[in-house]
Amino acid sequence: MKPSSTPQPDPAIIRDALRRITASTLVPTGSVPATILTHVVERTLAGDDRTIKAYTIAVEGLGRSPDFNPDRDSTVRVAAMRLRNALDLYYAGPGARDPLRIRMAPGSYRPTFEPVAVEAEPGISAEPALPAVAPRSRRVAFSTSANWLIAISAILAMDLAMTVSLMAVQMRSDMAPYAAEVKPAYKRVRAAAKAPAGDPMLDQIHYQVQRSYRQVVD
């Protein structure tokens, strides 16, 4: 027999990949697909992959009688199809991060071994970590931020005080005309009570009262 001309990875790595598969629930140890996979892998590692056929798998791997006829018995074909599907599911799920994948191409019972570059886990960066910031630098940064907050708070407080002061001045300015008009009119009404009828000053008081209160005073 001629040994396989295809270079293979380290047999220890291949057997570890086989162990991972048969330890899963998709290709459990003792099942027909697991038995077939183990048989073809070991035959390939021994350099006998060219002799792997449905007949040798059934007789040597599954222990069938020498009169096994693969044309009449589809056990190996069906089990191999189940094995290919199980391998696809395994590498899409629990074996997604395995460093080596064992495949079996459709129409063939010979296994192939595919090394896979394992990517870094999510959240772990391959770039070197930046040096830690010195405690003094952190204190300086904190002090600078605190100073900015104090300055901004002081500016806002001054702005609020000025706004309140301007509003008070504006309110006093708005009320000044009313105070200037109402108070003299009030004093003149009291003085008019003592004035004789037809006094020019009384007429002036009537006018001022009407103007201040927007009504006619009898």
Image (cartoon, grey):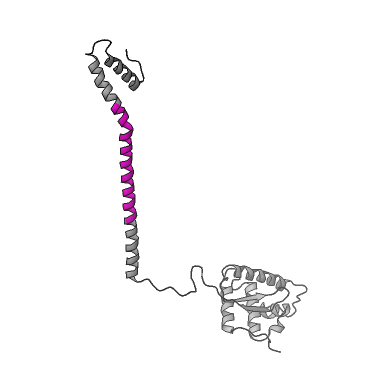
- Residue furthest to the right: 71
Q: Is residue 104 left or right of residue 169?
A: right
- Residue furthest to the left: 194
Q: Position of residue 146 (x, y in %)?
A: 32, 59
For residue 168: magenta?
yes
- Residue furthest to the top: 197
Q: Is residue 191 left or right of residue 113?
A: left
The residue shown at (33%, 37%) is 170
For residue 140: magenta?
no
Q: Quadrant of residue 115?
A: bottom right
Q: Position of residue 158 (x, y in %)?
A: 31, 49
Of residue 94 and residue 187, the one placed in the foreground of this image is: 187
The answer to whether 153 is drawn above or below residue 64 in the figure is above
Observer able to see residue 39: no
Q: Position of residue 214 (x, y in %)?
A: 36, 20
Quadrant in which the N terminus appears: bottom right
Q: Quadrant of residue 186?
A: top left
The answer to whether 18 is drawn above or below residue 89 in the figure is below
Of residue 162 and residue 128, the one placed in the foreground of this image is: 162
Quadrant in which the C terminus appears: top left
Is the magenta region chiefly helix, strand or loop?
Answer: helix
Which region of the structure is painted magenta?
151-180
Q: Quadrant of residue 61?
A: bottom right
The residue shown at (68%, 81%) is 60
For the image shown, how many numbered marks are present on the structure?
Answer: 0
Of residue 10 and residue 59, the one placed in the foreground of this image is: 10
Of residue 173 and residue 62, the one placed in the foreground of this image is: 173
